[in-house]
Image: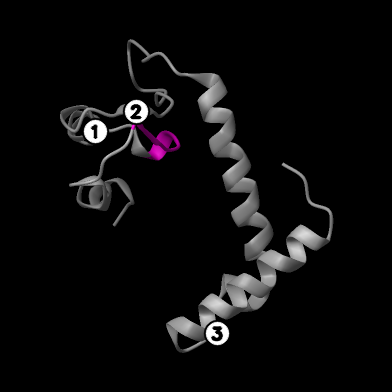
Amino acid sequence: MNDVTQAEGLVRGLEGRAVEGDKAYDSDAFLARVGEQGMAAVIPSRIHRRVPRPLDTSRYAVRYVIERWFGRLKAFRRVGTRYEKTAASFASMLALASSVVVLSGWAA
């Protein structure tokens, strides 16, 4: 199953100004759901759209920083493959990996 099939359920009932995502979330049904909730969609148009939607590139650039952060965290094998059995131990490993990334001098 692809991510966009589950995305509508994830945003249902949420409040905010915008939903940010990559091209995989460019679905008419998902965009309609986001619009119904009064949020803007900061999602680039996929190549198959005849008329591309406008994109707020400055807002989309912030999303990319977050993607890079998760990429750094996934470099830690225990976080990327989720070896920890309990939620508490996984959260602890996530906090430890985040600390290492910050202390290594990573800058956005």
Identify the residue at horizontal 27%, vertical 33% (top origin): 27
Q: Secondary structure at mark 3?
A: loop
What range of the chain is rendered magenta? Answer: 17-24
Residue 82 in view here: no
* Residue ID for mark 3: 83
Q: How far apart in space, not on screen, are marks 2 and 3 (Cα)?
A: 34 Å
Which residue lies under the disc numbered 1? 34
Relative placement, left or right, of 20 versus 63 is: left
Q: Position of residue 17 (x, y in %)?
A: 34, 30
Proximity of marks 2 and 1: CB atoms separated by less than 8 Å: yes
Do we see residue 68 in this rendering? yes
Pointer 2: residues within 10 angstroms few (<14), some, or many (20+)?
many
In the rendered image, which quarter is residue 72 located in? bottom right
Question: Furthest residue to the top?
Answer: 51
Q: Residue at x 32, y 36 (%)?
A: 16
Labels 1, 3: front one: 1
